[in-house]
Image (cartoon, rainbow, N blue to C red):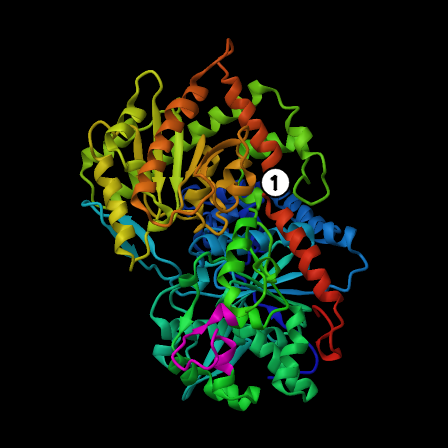
Amino acid sequence: MKQEQPLNHTVCRPQLMDIDGFDSLVELALNMRCAWNHAADKIWRRLDPEQWEITRNPWGILQTVSRSRVEEVTADPEFRDTIAELLKCKQQFKEAPGWFQQKHANSTLTGVAYFSMEFMLGEALPIYSGGLGNVAGDQLKAASDLGIPIIGVGLLYQQGYFRQLISQDGSQQAFYPYNDPGQLPITPVREADGEWLRLKIVLPGYSVWLRTWQVQVGRTVLYLLDSNDAANFPAHQGITSELYGGGLEQRLQQEMILGIGGWRLLHELGIKPEVCHLNEGHAAFAVLERARLFMEQTGQPFEIALAATRAGNLFTTHTAVKAGFDLFPPALIEQYLGHYAEQRLGISVEQLLALGRNNADDPAESFNMAYLAIRGSGAVNGVSQLHGNVSRSIFQPLFPRWPKTDIPVGHVTNGVHMPSWDSPMADKIWTQSCGQDRWSGTSETLTEDIFAIPDAQLWEFRAAARKSLVIYARKRLTRHLAAGGAPAEAVDEVHNLLDHNFLTLGFARRFATYKRPALLLHDPERLLRILTNPQRPVQLILAGKAHPADQQGQELIRKWIHFIRQSKARKHIIFLSDYDMLLTERLVQGVDVWINTPRRPWEACGTSGMKVLVNGGINLSELDGWWAEAYSPDVGWALGDVREHNDDPAWDAIEAEALYDLLEQEVIPEFYARDDQGIPSAWVARMRESMARLTPKFSASRAVQEYTEQYYLPAAQTKQPPAQAGGFQ
């Protein structure tokens, strides 16, 4: 399948209905831009309001809606005009020069390949778990907004990450629904003659065929590989079955497919990016395949090929502890990559293992994917200022005799794609004050514009957002309780829970011990008094999953469920199961205060608290990750003494008391201190400062611009060997 010229590949879009105007609906539904540009929401809601409310999947709606329903709505002239206007706007967006074209018109950068194990783009494509996928998805979206030539490479999981249900005894139950490709907004990549573009990857003793799929993300493209090909042995069809599922062997297989298969896919498509961006070490094998192709094209040995190509590779680490990196036993590496090393790279297994070890002479040392990524990359960065410093400590053994401050690990603090996380009400506020193109990288007056909004308008917006969240939370809890077999009286009780006038706290994240999700439960009686104070009532909405193998995390969920079922707490606190992107959206749009309590410095960055900024929410967080550089007393509240205490129970108790004190003495009084117009002026002032100063700074737009100017452009300007020059074809 090797070709000197780019393949004339096409995207297969099945014609499901021969109805005039249906192709236009297909074109809109197959672009993930509809996950953050909500102009088309009314179309899908009109076609099937119930399914839209649950799935937010336009493509799935088109697969299931009846012909008569489509004919009915497309016969409406107003409906057809709406579609025509959406397509016009879509085309204008595609053709308009973005920030990159305007600011770097003469740049030699024509392509960045962005590799990630997961991408969170929307509920319609559930191939994500949490933070890593959040960052990857938001950066692809921001690249589309800014016109940066990034192309994504990932895996299509047959089941994705698990879905959660809480049983009657408070236990987490894990379910793995099948990701039917026909219901997902993806299309097979086909060659000019209609053949499905498939890759053949050699594994020990057998070969695996990989199918290729394309996802349109605005102006950006994401390619996905999966092993569920009928030509594969049944056991091998399941290699890409689960995200972060299975054992070490399956993880290694997946990472070989992502790294080696992913770079080979780009080659087959005729795509020759100057930059390869590894979002975590899972895709580190891409540096080997990139070097191998250079060897094939130039006849140079591996050492020269790796040295020649590494300047174009960037490794972003998201891990704050050494134990978080993927480690593989030497025997497993030899089994799966021994032939590849000797026959394709021309090096010994020992030489390959040395690339992933601190001590090359220790035959028992595991193979560390982060070490391979570092040795194969010209630049390395952490994802917050604090994490950059932590990463220099973690990787110091690879740089003996170097002063810690000189270890070549920089940082780009993560940001979130604000259009993906703002509510319709927030979007209206920002549009009125800052303009439609505020996240395009061209606006420099966002901070000043937000300060011009009247207090009354900001407070009205927040009150409406809180009310919307309460309504949504009741609906979701009702549905999940019924699905879990709860008694009818428990289901009926839900409409009495929560009050949209109460101060609303949010805590939602992965239930892992280092995130201390039970810190608020340190003194249950004190928490009860805080929540049920009749003069200043408070309500708390919780959500989160624990990994199916993490028994400690699951026990923390049970602890909360049992507390919630106490009669005094029942109306003031709920746990919403199956924490996913849709639930995240609604929570960050509606809560007044977002609480985060990790053990410093184990939160590399954290992005959940960034999502409340655009919606007028305020953060109360440990001084870790992004909050360590964002916090000041006028934008939120902080926990911690900027020192590290590991997992000391005594320190946890101190911080729990400090958290209660903050709530009782500062947060709650400020929320309920109203002026003559019923507005909490001090609260609105803090909210305004947070929105104005922090939202632009912690947006994915800012982060991707930094990656472009600090890493991508310098890498592209580095003299590249002729065989590596070029860009997207």
- The number of discs equals 1
**Residue hosting label 1:** 77
Q: Is residue 19 in view from this perspective?
A: no
Q: Residue at x 66, y 75 (%)?
A: 309
Q: Residue at x 25, y 29 (%)?
A: 569
164 or 688, nearer to the observer: 688
Q: Does residue 299 sit above or below 469 in this rendering?
A: below
Q: In the rendered structure, which amino acid carries the disc numbered 1?
A: Pro
State left or right for residue 101 relative to residue 140: right
- Spot occupied by residue 604 in the image (x, y as percentages of width and height): 48, 52
Q: Does residue 602 sit above or below 447 in this rendering?
A: below
State left or right for residue 726 relative to residue 158: right
Task: State the image quarter where residue 538 is shown.
Answer: top left
Residue segment shown in magenta: 352-371
State left or right for residue 135 relative to residue 696: left
Label 1 crowd (10 A; few <14 / some 14-19 / many >=20): few
Q: Does residue 371 sit above or below 644 in this rendering?
A: below
Task: Give the SS element for disc 1.
Answer: helix
Q: Does residue 515 sit above or below 212 in this rendering?
A: above
State left or right for residue 600 relative to residue 554: right
- Spot occupied by residue 441 in the image (x, y as percentages of width and height): 70, 45
- Spot occupied by residue 129 in the image (x, y as percentages of width and height): 42, 56
